[in-house]
Image (tube, rainbow, N blue to C red):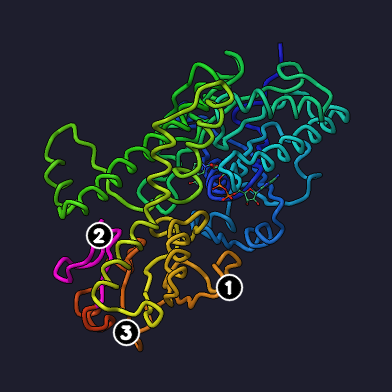
Amino acid sequence: MHLLPKLNNCKVTIVGLGYVGLPLAVQIDKTLNCHKTGQKLRRKIVGFDINQERISELKKGFDRTNEVKDNDLINGNNISFTNLESEIENSDVYIITVPTPIDSFNNPNLKPIEIASKLIGKTLKIRRDNELIKNIPIVLFESTVYPGLTQEICIPIIEAEMVGKVNKDFLCGYSPERINPGDRGRSIGDIVKITSGMDEITANWVDSFYASFIEAGTHKAKSIKIAETAKVIENTQRDLNIALVNELAIICRKLNIDTLDVLEAANTKWNFLDFRPGLVGGHCIGVDPYYLTHRATLAGYSPGVVLAGRRINNYMGDWIIEELVSVMTSEGFTLSRSTFLILGLTFKENCPDMRNSGVIKLIQKIKSYGISIVVVDPFIEKTDKNLPKKIDFYNKIPTNQKFEAIIAAVAHEQFKLLKTEFFKQLIVEKGKFVDIKGIIPRELNPIRL
Ligand SMILES: NC(=O)c1ccc[n+]([C@@H]2O[C@H](COP(=O)([O-])OP(=O)(O)OC[C@H]3O[C@@H](n4cnc5c(N)ncnc54)[C@H](O)[C@@H]3O)[C@@H](O)[C@H]2O)c1
């Protein structure tokens, strides 16, 4: 029988302090009484990240992802941030929240999660060899993975590195994160957490641990594999639903029918799902389906529907620009003497994250026609290293210039407030509006998806 960490008094290390890891660390730190039992919680939280700059910023109380309040960092209860491995050796619980991206061939890039698993293995070895703590450590993964990855890849790495065995030297669980960055109405504590463990005892411990700080409660999955699969299919389903309306948008345009009017009509049926066409980017919806299809292919099945959805969604940026350019050339615009204004660069509204943004692909397509562009995004800093090279970038819309086309690409709150007169003063005569996100007033007759 293992001595399990005390639920109300344990040291928790979060490995990877990005959009997922930081809010999680703060949520655990902020919860002083267990939501289930009311018991007082005395936990110590250590946030670990390999990015030294991120750690220095967090220590100063600045979160560049805008997900947590500065005050929660500076005046936290018992939370600290470090990039020193030596400071995480004596923890009871390790939660891994590192990225799980794809490579240029859309295959899973497992490097970050493999490196993090090695670090955990090394740390657990030191912890055991030096007899730092009596109880058995619990390792939890939250990164999105394909079904089986935790047990097939991560656990063997930890075992090899620590020269030990799961269920003897450490316990393991998986709990996918379902947060929606930028969504102020639905934060980590408001979303039911799926939990799982390698065996019944671990699963119960993991479930009670999350239930203590997630107000919305938990769902204990029957196995780690089920919890892993639930997460990837949530995002795969969303990707496919968007792909369907995107394809509908292409068909409607060919038939000269307004897609949004069609959706508005169809939505009056109780079981019609309300999805809107648009660009799919970021590191979840556009990435997770590839984790599922990768594992399916390894298992000898070639997924058709899921990959078809991915193809449609990846094509939308090109399609929008091809349509716009065809209209403009037929009306006599000279593309090489045109400048397009693009509203928004991030992959989604009200958030500074531009990883895998569909707008970046859109920009590449526009540039391939020799068209100049001006990009405006109030959420991105001009100094951001990820900004695409050689673009005129602003935080505010420049009003000293007129554009041949204006493309509303991201529905940031600031853009939604813009009025017809404002748009009119920015556009040349017969200039075109393209409204990807329903921001541009209808009377301006925008090309809509
Ligand atoms: N962002 C979301 O909306 C979201 C939602 C649900 C699930 N997820 C999943 O959660 C995971 C994390 O995503 P994210 O958006 O927080 O990523 P992120 O890029 O914002 O943050 C990851 C952090 O991990 C750090 N890191 C990388 N390798 C590390 C290592 N070996 N040791 C310590 N730190 C390391 C990075 O420096 C970075 O700060 C991914 O698997 C993602 O798919 C993300």
* Start-end of magenta stretch: 431-449
Pointer 3 residue Cβ closer than 8 Å to ligand 1? no
| Residue at the top extreme of this rendering | 1
Give coordinates of residue 439: x percent, y percent.
26, 64
**Circle 2 residues within 10 Å: few <14, some 14–19, many ≥20:** some
Which residue is painted at 47% across and 36% down in the image?
Answer: 289
- In this rendered view, identify the residue nearer to me: 151 or 265: 265
Above or below — where is 154 with respect to 399? above
Label 3: which secondary element: loop
Please state, as top left, top right, bottom left or bottom right, where the C terminus lies in the image.
bottom left
Amino acid at pointer 2: Gly
Which residue is painted at 72% across and 23% down in the image?
Answer: 170
> Could you say which quadrant of the image residue 320 lies in?
bottom left
Left or right: residue 46 versus residue 254 is: right
Label 1: which secondary element: loop
Give coordinates of residue 205: x percent, y percent.
58, 21
* Residue at image mark 1: 383
Label 2: which secondary element: loop
**Circle 3 residues within 10 Å: few <14, some 14–19, many ≥20:** many
Give coordinates of residue 371: x percent, y percent.
42, 75
Amino acid at pointer 1: Thr
How far apart, in angstroms, are the residues tagged by discs 3 and 2? 22 Å
Which residue is painted at 50% across and 16% down in the image?
Answer: 222
Left or right: residue 294 versus residue 339 is: right
| Visible residue check, residue 356 | yes
* Residue at image mark 2: 438
Above or below — where is 77 with respect to 206? below
* Residue at image mark 3: 402
